[in-house]
Amino acid sequence: MKLFQDDKEMFEIMEQRLYTAVCCDVMDDLGYRNQAMHHNIRPLDDNVKVIGRAKTILAVDVYEVTKDCYKVEIEALDSVKEGEVVVVSTNNSLTNGIWGELLSTAAKARGARGAIIDGLGRDIEKIREMKFPVFMVGFKPVDSKGRGLVIDYDCPINCGGVIVEPGDIVFGDYDGVIAIPHRICHEVIERSLHKVEKEQSTKNALLKGKLLKDVYDQFGVL
């Protein structure tokens, strides 16, 4: 039986009922134990979630202003599709604010649900005003021109220590950002929904005064 009609329904259910920690627990059980990005990738606003298909972008540090330095970057942003989350690998660069207001505007206008950057950004107040979910490491006001260069997109990347492939499900909340491989995403989400129900039963039993050991023996979640 098909669990979701489409990605939109799947994302809505995830946003309403799931959180990154429970999905990590499920992926641990399936043998995918390195799907959480580095702890320093944080949301610009504490109360936001971001969920969508990964639109991967690969950038590297450079040390000179090259001809057509924005060419691939512009191609990547113009090819964003509805329901995607832009995921930028800078190779953990701290040299420039590669993501800013205009890239957020372009991504949002194309239907992106947010952006994940394993580096720095700028124009932070403007991005917050847009209510566009962005997760990044920190801030720096300098442009990427002559400092960072987008060299490819729609390719496998390492973002925050996690290999992300185009079409993987990217999920970020206050706990952090995870990538759910596209080949197991429906299984992970189905199991996560079931685990959430068991966790609620565990919580209810604990609130009634039952011992943790007895509750764990009954429901098997912690």
Image (cartoon, rainbow, N blue to C red):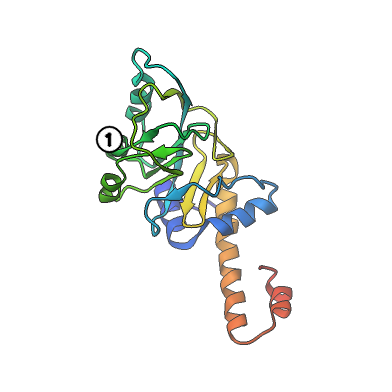
Q: In the displayed structure, does residue 6 sit left or right of residue 208?
A: left
What residue is rendered at 54% in x and 49% in y?
39
What residue is rendered at 63% in x and 87% in y?
209
Q: Is residue 202 visible?
A: yes
When asked about the image quadrant of residue 149, the answer is top left
The three-letter code of the residue at mark 1 reads Leu
When asked about the image quadrant of residue 99, the answer is top left
- From the viewer's side, name the closer residue of 135 and 16: 135
Residue 216 horizontal/vertical position (percent): 70, 74
As displayed, is residue 178 above or below residue 141? below
- Disc 1 is placed on an element classified as helix
Residue 112 horizontal/vertical position (percent): 35, 40
- From the viewer's side, name the closer residue of 113 and 95: 95
What residue is rendered at 46% in x and 35% in y?
94
Residue 59 horizontal/vertical position (percent): 46, 27
Q: Which residue is mark 1?
A: 102
Q: Is residue 5 visible?
A: no
As displayed, is residue 95 above or below residue 177? above
Would you call the spot at circle 1 few (<14 residues within 10 Å), some (14-19), or many (20 or more)? Answer: few
As displayed, is residue 219 above or below residue 17? below
Q: Quadrant of the C terminus?
A: bottom right
Residue 127 horizontal/vertical position (percent): 29, 45
Q: In the displayed structure, does residue 23 sit left or right of residue 148?
A: right
